[in-house]
Image (spheres, rainbow, N blue to C red):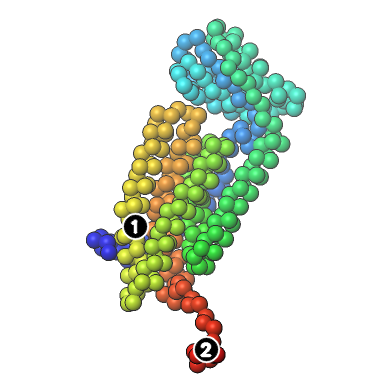
């Protein structure tokens, strides 16, 4: 028995309104302005250079704009002298010229910043970007479908629906944050979304397993009381796991540099939302679907013999 007596389900109506508001904002932003897709999906040129001395990224970006390379981003990575330059396909430039855009960018920078060294120059075509976007969407949908089937076979349909609703809730809110704040969405963020699904699923399974055991063991008590007891019993484990994971992600976010910032940001938001959804969203769905003790009882094996129980 848990010493904690927090009435989680007593706040489920407030949590429902909170989740609804977050989902409305996220979906509204996704439909109205979409995601700020990175070069992995839109195509374009990526150039890594090393300057002879420190120069502010904003200064370099301003020079590139004056040289005719618009809508690009310039970021430091590693040291202050190392710059990562991303430039999307330029309007009015044919396909063959787009492929050599990285070399043109370096040539323009070399005329302004003597001693600059080209580390690498890559070009991603728009066809490859479209294929990556399609494959990424299919990967997310496949992950949700496999999770639903796994929970369906391990638990019951109520737990299956609750887990998938919670996971979809987490993914949409993380996507909404990237849409609202116009953070760049690239392949590293997509990988983080898949990791969020795995993390949130693990948390949801632990909570669901305790809820199932409490329903089977309880001889009295309402579903709200039984679920509250299960949530209190798993709260310590949930918080310790979430906080230790979050500490590592925050270290990556603030000290890992620009290259993995999107990945760390998506996972940090996902861990917080995933912990919340495993407590309120998944458990709330169970109550909405009127789960009972009878739904979770293990069927007794049938005995061979005559109808009166005797054996021939």
| Picture coordinates of residue 65, whole percent (x, y) | 58, 21
Q: Is residue 129 left or right of residue 85?
A: right
Toward the viewer: 277 or 147? 147
| Picture coordinates of residue 75, whole percent (x, y) | 50, 24
Residue at the far left in the pictured view? 3
Report how far apart the C-alphas of labels 1 and 2 lie in the structure.
Answer: 46 Å
Helix or strand or loop: what does disc 2 sit on? loop
Q: Quadrant of the C terminus?
A: bottom right
Instruction: Tell me the residue at 43%/51% (across/down).
Output: 274
| Residue that carries the numbered disc 1 in the rendered image | 234
**Location of residue 93 (image quadrant):** top right
Instruction: Tell me the residue at 75%/27% (across/down).
Output: 95
| Residue that carries the numbered disc 2 in the rendered image | 311
Residue 287 against residue 239 in the figure, above or below: below
Q: Is residue 174 left or right of residue 149?
A: left
Q: Quadrant of the N terminus?
A: bottom left
């Amino acid at each position: 028995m848990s010493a904690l007596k927090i009435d989680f389900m007593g706040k489920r109506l407030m949590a429902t309104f909170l989740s609804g508001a977050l989902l409305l904002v996220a979906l509204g932003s996704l439909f109205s302005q979409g995601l700020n897709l990175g070069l992995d999906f839109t195509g374009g040129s990526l150039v890594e250079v090393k300057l002879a001395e420190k120069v502010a990224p904003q200064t370099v970006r301003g020079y590139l704009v004056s040289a005719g390379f618009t809508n690009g981003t310039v970021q430091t990575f590693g040291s202050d002298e190392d710059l990562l330059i991303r430039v999307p396909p330029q309007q009015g430039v044919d396909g063959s010229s787009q492929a050599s855009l990285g070399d043109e960018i370096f040539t323009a920078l070399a005329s302004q910043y003597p001693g600059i060294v080209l580390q690498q120059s890559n070009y991603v075509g728009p066809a490859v970007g479209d294929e990556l976007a399609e494959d990424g969407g299919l990967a997310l949908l496949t992950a949700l479908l496999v999770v639903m089937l796994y929970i369906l076979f391990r638990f019951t349909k109520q737990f299956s629906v609750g887990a998938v609703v919670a996971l979809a809730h987490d993914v949409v809110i993380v996507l909404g944050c990237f849409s609202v704040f116009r953070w760049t969405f690239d392949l590293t963020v997509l990988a983080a979304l898949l990791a969020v699904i795995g993390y949130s699923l693990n948390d949801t399974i632990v909570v669901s397993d305790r809820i199932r055991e409490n329903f089977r063991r309880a001889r009295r008590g309402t579903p709200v009381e039984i679920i509250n007891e299960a949530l209190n019993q798993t709260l310590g484990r949930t918080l310790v796991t979430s906080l230790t994971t979050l500490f590592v992600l925050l270290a990556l976010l603030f000290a890992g540099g620009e290259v993995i910032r999107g990945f760390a940001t998506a996972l940090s938001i996902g861990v917080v939302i995933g912990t919340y959804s495993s407590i309120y969203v998944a458990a709330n769905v169970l109550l909405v679907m009127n789960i009972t003790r009878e739904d979770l009882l293990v069927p007794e094996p049938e005995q061979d013999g005559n109808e009166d129980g005797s054996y021939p």
